[in-house]
Image: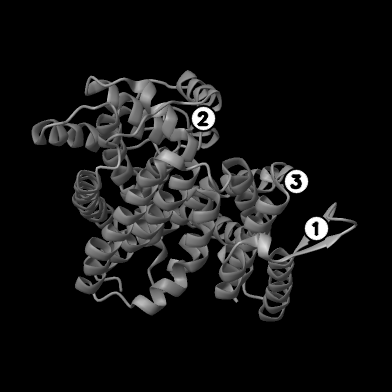
Amino acid sequence: MLGLFCVLFFAGNPDWFQISINNGQLTLNLLVLLRWVALGISIGYAYVKRNLTIWILIAMLLGISIGTDFPSIALNLKVLSDIFLRLIKTIIAPLLFSTLVVGIAGHSNIKQVGRMGIKSIVYFELVTTVALFIGLVSINLSKAGVGTDLHAQNAQIEKAQTLLAQKQSHDVILDIFPENIAKAVSDNQILQVVIFSILFGIGLALVKNQEKKAAVLLFSEGLSEVMFKFTNMVMLFAPFAVGGAMAYSVASLGMGVIGSLFMLVGTLYAALFAFVALVLVPIGLLVKLPFKRFLNAISEPVSIAFATASSEAALPKAMERLEEMGIPRKVVAFVLPTGYSFNLDGTTLYLSLASVFIAQASGIDLSIGQQIQMCLILMLTSKGVAGVRGASFLILVSTVASLGLDPTKAFAILAVDALMDMGRTTVNVVGNCLATYVVAKWEGEV
């Protein structure tokens, strides 16, 4: 059905298939009609199957069609994805808190928390460093920025100014620790919530009074179960959110917006594919990952991440599905959210690639030493900012400026940032799900 949709969407010249009515004042495009018929059949198939992954895929196709055929309506559908993301954000903090507290205090294995922390950080640093260099190699091979004339339109300038206006100083170490847990939850600082939950869990494990300890554990276990049920209810809205997000993206971008930035987008997706094939797949083979079970487990969260371009939207479902796969809850609750701040494979690859692209477009040939220096900067600046709106753009601007380039050149990239964000967010989620399995394997938990 997906193949039929693609054929009807992309094949041929639509003008060849038109029915004229009233001297051509009303035309009916036969390809468009057939595409909508195919969508109708797909919706019927999804209704019979009653599978969330299928519903999400159909919603993506439906969103693309609405964004293409009814752009004025599609521009108003972003509210659906915004509602979904708001509901997801209400889940994350209590879900992380309850699962981490139960995982740490319930098993009272404090040493394992330290071991998992060290192993996770080592793994994250190695993989993200490889991602940075794959981005560099890809853009140096494609030379996508050479001869490109970067000029930001008014819309991109306004968006960039809005993002830069909320830029705050970022201390990589200090920002890991919460000063106020309510503020951390409000600002969606996932890593700070994780740190608070770990310390709370360790404190609870050290409580000698078993009655008091059991009472808090019982509450945390109940809260965890409730939040997973809450997640299941919110996920029923996911197809609407995915459809709305895709419709808005297609309507706002337009199919021909890429223009001179086509090579940048193509290079990014080729580099992301290369990273998955050359890095993530070999790692999976090394730890004897059951690929079929793994792909089945992450299909829903990955499709949500791609359509909404939000890693956070996929987090609750990813936690649930990885646990169903057999990875212990204590490992999932620790490694997966920590990776959201330290293991952004797709984002780090994009940052190195985009920085060199801007240099090429500016007519500046960066030496190998300068590119390595840039990677060292990105290794530090890209950590712990997952909760910051427009974080990747802010990091890109500061990195470009540190290289002596005009940071306003980065504004033009915002024209296709949404399209690139889908790809890099997808790889972020896949990379973190794999990292969770790797650490669990390392700990002998699977």
Please tell me whether mark 1 or mark 2 is closer to you in this view.
1
Can residue 233 be seen here? no
Task: Name the residue located 55 percent from the left edge and 50 percent from the top edge.
Answer: 308
Q: Nearer the viewer, residue 392 or 138?
A: 138
Q: Secondary structure at mark 2?
A: helix
Q: Quadrant of the N terminus?
A: bottom right
Instruction: Provide the residue designation for mark 2.
Output: 183
Earlier along the polypeptide chain: callout 1 or callout 3? 1
Is 299 placed above or below 245 here?
below
Give whichever of 31, 415 is nearer the camera: 31
Q: CA distance from mark 1 to mark 3?
A: 20 Å
For mark 3, give the secondary structure.
helix
- Residue 174 vertical placement versus 75 (above, below): above
- Quarter residue 82 falls in: top right
Lower position in the chain sequence, tag 1 or tag 2: 1
- Residue 160 at x, y percent in the picture: 48, 25
In the figure, 3 relative to 379: above or below? below
| Residue 73 badge | 3
Q: Nearer the viewer, mark 3 or mark 2?
A: 3
Residue under the point 23% across and 73% down: 285
Residue under pointer 1:
27
Whether residue 64 is visible to the viewer of this picture, yes or no, is yes
Q: Horizontally, is 218 left or right of 342 in the view? A: right
